[in-house]
Image (tube, rainbow, N blue to C red):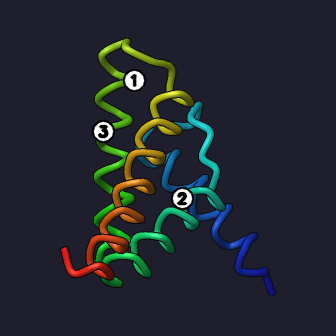
């Protein structure tokens, strides 16, 4: 029986292949960490929404040639992580 990590890596590889993105490197742990921040800082359903929007933004930046795939993904995830953290802080302070 495969571990959860092995299953996620296999799934990621299969999905990338199906979408013809075999050359893209995905840091599964980093994506999951962003999902965790969004889920705990905003609301649980924010996790898939946040990771989708960050990925979409990264794809647009990369596709336009403004940045490499890696830089685009890192920048989009950093913005999403910061916004989710700031959102939680604002909610906690009643803003």
For residue 46, side relative to residue 6 (left or right): left
Task: Answer with the quarter of the image where residue 19 lies.
Answer: top left
Question: Where is residue 87 shown, x and y percent of the image?
Answer: 30, 67
Task: Answer with the quarter of the image where residue 42 lies.
Answer: bottom left
**Vertical arrangement, residue 62 with respect to residue 21, above or below:** above
Gap in Å between the C-alphas at discs 1 and 2?
17 Å
User: Which residue is located at x 48 percent, y 70 percent?
Assistant: 37
Gap in Å between the C-alphas at discs 1 and 3?
9 Å
Pointer 1 local density, CA inside 10 Å: few below 14, some 14–19, many at least 20: some
**Vertical arrangement, residue 3 with respect to residue 22, above or below:** below
Which tag, 3 or 2, sits closer to the chain's start?
Answer: 2
Question: Where is residue 74 shown, x and y percent of the image?
Answer: 53, 38
Question: What is the secondary structure assignment of the residue under circle 3?
Answer: helix
Q: Quadrant of the C terminus?
A: bottom left
Q: Which residue is mark 2?
A: 31
Question: What is the secondary structure assignment of the residue under circle 2?
Answer: helix
Label 2 near label 1: C-beta < 8 Å? no
Total number of numbered discs in the rendering: 3
Question: Where is residue 8 shown, x and y percent of the image?
Answer: 63, 68
For residue 69, side relative to residue 41 (left or right): right
Q: Which residue is mark 3?
A: 57
Q: Which residue is mark 1?
A: 62
């Amino acid at each position: 029986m495969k571990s959860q990590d092995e299953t996620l890596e296999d799934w990621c590889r299969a999905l990338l292949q199906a979408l013809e993105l075999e050359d893209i490197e995905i840091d599964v742990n980093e994506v999951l960490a962003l999902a965790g921040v969004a889920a705990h800082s905003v609301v649980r359903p924010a996790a898939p929404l946040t990771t989708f929007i960050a990925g979409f933004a990264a794809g647009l930046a990369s596709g336009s040639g403004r940045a490499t795939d890696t830089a685009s993904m890192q920048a989009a995830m950093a913005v999403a992580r910061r916004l989710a953290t700031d959102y939680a802080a604002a909610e906690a302070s009643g803003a």
